[in-house]
Image: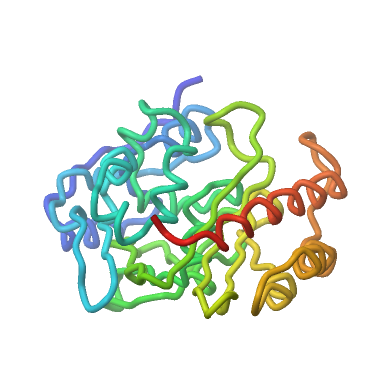
Amino acid sequence: MKPAPFVYAKARSLDHASELLQQDGAKLLAGGQSLIATLNMRLSSPRLLIDINGIAALGGISREDGQLRIGALVRQGEAERSPDIAAHAPLIAAALPHIGHPAIRNRGTIGGSVAFADPAAELPACLLALDADIEIEGSSGRRSVRADRFFTGLFETALGPRDVLTAIRVPVASPASRYGFAEFARRHGDYALVGLAASAQADGKGLSDVRLAFFGIGTTPVRATKAQAALAGEIDGQKVEAAVAALASNLDPPDDLQGTGAFKRHLAGVLLRRVVKQLSEPRR
C-alpha cells in the first residue's frame, strides 16, 4: 500500500520543529521504523510530516548530575555500541540487541521507540524499571515526566500533539546496582510475547528497591508491585515462588492471537525466576 498524501518539511532546529508542530495534522519523523509502516498501511494519515533528523540538539549521550542523558535521535544501533551505555545503563544495553534486527536498529531511534509506546517494546519497560525521566519540549516550555506517568495507554503517552520528546535520563549505575532482562519471542527480533526488565540494589546478602516492569502483557508496561515486595531482603527459593505467585495479583494479560492470558502469566513467572538469578549476581 501507499501512504495518503502529505506535505514534507525538514526542521532546521528544535524551535523550527515546534513551530511546524503548531499546524493541525502534523507528525514527527525520526527513525521511521514504526511510522513508515503505519503510513503505508494508512493507519496514520498526517497532513504534514516533519523530519527532525537534522537537529543536532536531539543527539548525543552524556553524563549529567548523576544521570545518563540519551538524546532522542540516538540510533538504537549507536546506543548498542556505546561504551557509556554499557557502563552506566547496563539494563538498556542488555535490551537493545532484542530490538528488531541490525538494519532496524541502525535507523530506529531511542526517542522514537519511547514515544511510539508499543506495549510489547523493550525500551519503555526499561525506562519504567529504571525510574527514568523523559524530557519534553512543547508550546508550554520544557518539562520532565517520570516514566511511571509517561505511558498512559495503548500507544498513548504524556506527549501532547505539539510536544517533542528531546531525551531520556536514567540514573547512572552504581556498584550496588543490579539489573535483569529476559523475554520470550517466537523468533529473535520479533516483538516479545512476554518480557521483563528489572532493577534492584544490592543490600548485604539481599536486594532492596526491586523494580519489575513486564512488557507484552498489557496496554502499557506493567509494574509488578506485589512481586517486587515479595523479593525484598535475602533471596531464597521460597521468596522467589512467593513473588511468582504474586504475579496473579499484578498481571491480567488478555487472551489474543499469541496465546491465552493464563499462558502469558505462566511465561511471566518463568521469566521472573530467570531474572531474579540475574539480579542476585554481582555486576561484571
Which residue is outermost to the top?
1
Q: Is residue 61 left or right of residue 124?
A: left
What's the colour scheme? rainbow
- Numbered marks: total: 0
Q: Is residue 266 left or right of residue 127?
A: right
Q: Is residue 128 above or below residue 142?
A: above
- Where residue 51 appears, as percent x and y from the top left, is 25, 43
Q: Nearer the viewer, residue 27 or 171?
A: 171
- Where residue 273 appears, as percent x and y from the top left, is 71, 54
Q: Nearer the viewer, residue 147 or 68?
A: 68
Instruction: Name the residue located 60 percent from the left edge and 62 percent from the top edge.
Output: 213
Q: Is residue 197 above or below residue 143?
A: above
- Quarter residue 85 falls in: bottom left
Q: Is residue 259 left or right of residue 184?
A: right
Which residue is outermost to the front?
205
- Where residue 8 appears, as percent x and y from the top left, is 26, 38
Instruction: Name the residue located 51 percent from the left edge and 53 percent from the top edge.
Output: 117
Instruction: Name the residue located 24 percent from the left edge and 62 percent from the top edge.
Output: 18
Instruction: Name the residue located 33 percent from the left edge and 48 percent from the top edge.
Output: 28
